[in-house]
Amino acid sequence: MNEFENITIDAALKRVRKYLKLLQEELAHRSSLDRAYISMLERKNLNLAVPALLESYIT
């Protein structure tokens, strides 16, 4: 079984952010989102705005 097969979006977001050695503040800045929003996403408190976050990793 692939290690990413059953990963949740919130866990994937946190894993990728840490792999890239980004603080929540830096990810928030790169994605034009609030740091509190990133925090809530990682804690499963909100639904993910996928396009905004993916764009921050691509650019």
Image (tube, rainbow, N blue to C red):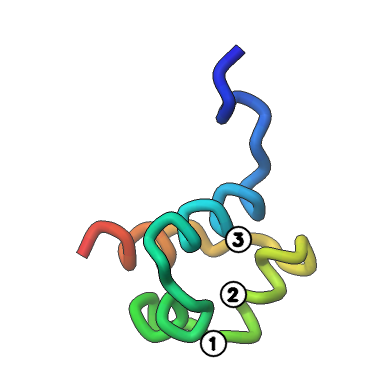
Kind of residue at badge 2:
Ile
Q: Secondary structure beneath disc 1?
A: loop
The quadrant holding residue 45 is bottom right
Quick one: quadrant of the N terminus? Answer: top right
Which numbered disc, 3 or 2, marks the residue that appears first in the sequence? 2
Which residue does the numbered mark 2 point to in the structure image? 38
Rounded to the nearest whole Å, what is the CA distance between mark 1 and mark 3?
13 Å
Which numbered disc, 1 or 3, marks the residue that appears first in the sequence? 1
Q: Residues within 10 Å of mark 3 (few under 14, many from 20)?
A: some
Which residue does the numbered mark 1 point to in the structure image? 34
Q: Residues within 10 Å of mark 2 (few under 14, many from 20)?
A: many
Farthest residue, direction top: 1
The numbered dot on residue 55 is none
Question: Is residue 44 rendered to the left or right of residue 58?
Answer: right
Q: Residues within 10 Å of mark 1 (few under 14, many from 20)?
A: few
Q: Secondary structure beneath disc 3?
A: loop
Are the residues flagged by discs 1 and 3 in contact, CB closer than 8 Å?
no
Which residue does the numbered mark 3 point to in the structure image? 48
Eye-nearest disc, 3 or 2: 2
Are the residues flagged by discs 2 and 1 in contact, CB closer than 8 Å?
yes
